[in-house]
Amino acid sequence: MKAAVLEKPGMLTVKDIPLRTCSNDEVLIKVKSCGICGSDLRYFKGENPWALHTLGKSIPNPPNLILGHEFAGIVADAGSPALRHLIGKRVCVEPYNTCGMCDNCRTGKYNLCVNTRHIGHSAGWPAMDYTPGGMAEYCQVWATHVYELPDSISFEEATILDPLAVAIHAVSISGFKPGDTVLVMGSGPVGICIAQTVKVIGSVRVFCTDIYDNALKVAEKVGADDALNVNLIDIEEYVFRQTGNRGVNLVFDTVGTRESQKQALTLLSTSGTLVNLVANSSQINYTLKDLSGERSIKGSSNNLYDDFLLGIRLMAAGRIQVKPMINHHFLLEDVNRGFDVLFDKTGSGAVKVVIDVS
């Protein structure tokens, strides 16, 4: 089969590789669409975003990593007779599996499982010729982790289900309440999904920021009340003026820079919460008085299975719009062009790139 293999940092090659036989608990997905995620860009550059985000440390990546965890397709085969009823089904994929035995798993925090195996990431896999991913003609997936797609969700739309689940999880742990005012820093797919999620639940005002006008246009189109270019507007002055100098109840930071963190803390109202969705090695400086008035900071990592299921239901019901985000398509053999446009958002205006695999 053909697959996009990250042979080493900066070298993504589409090549023919052997098709592995499914294990008894797996089904074989004929991949139709796969999104390029920001984490894929970080793997391309040599980082390990899963380890940084979940374990808080960097771990070297193995060679020959097949990228892609935001994918959907059709079940083409099954590893056991008991699973053959799934053949032919249109499905999306929850791309990670957990051990069930570590402390995090046994206390319900399996999104933080230290033994996670994550499709499209290097996490948890034993030594193998090619670690599995969705940027390939076929991918083996645990049968327990495929969900039948409603007819109202296309394969390309299903590539947004993973970032939507991440967004829903961040909102669920944030302490958000109907009537809250929210600032979303960074209007990529996760940020735009957060904005829509809090609007569905009952936010009275959502501010979205970014440096790319095209992303801000999408955020505004799908429901953000204010879409602000941080290079053109004094965000602090604007938000304080619009909120009567109170600031916002919640900030979701999908940018993760020293500047975004400082600005987020400045804009929090009393008892407000900053939720970080990015993990990197940036040194952030703040004083204890920045957390006065019961302000707090928390991190959000990955998602739970019910977050993914809720995402399917919200998307199927038309409560979450994803088509406006998807503005570039490439064939599998042109996957490097997809990475190029995401590395050059100023020139390309890319928000979400989808690889049309078959």
Image: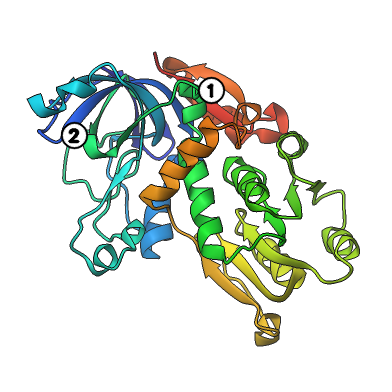
Residue that extends furthest to the top in the rendered view of this protein: 358
Q: In the figure, residue 174 lies in which quadrant?
A: bottom right
Query: To which residue does mark 2 refer?
Result: 129
Q: CA distance from mark 2 to mark 1?
A: 25 Å
**Mark 1 crowd level (few <14, some 14–19, many ≥20, 10 Å Cα):** some
User: With 127 as the anchor, is 135 left or right in this view?
Assistant: right
- Quadrant in the picture for the N terminus: top left
Q: Secondary structure at mark 1?
A: helix
- Looking at the picture, which amino acid does disc 1 mark? Arg
Q: Is residue 327 above or below residue 43?
A: above
* Residue 52 in view: yes
The image position of residue 146, as x and y in percent, is 30, 34
Which sits in the foreground, 338 or 243? Answer: 243
* Residue 39 in view: no
Q: Earlier in the sequence, mark 2 or mark 1?
A: 2
Which sits in the foreground, 328 or 221? Answer: 221
Which sits in the foreground, 150 or 128? Answer: 150
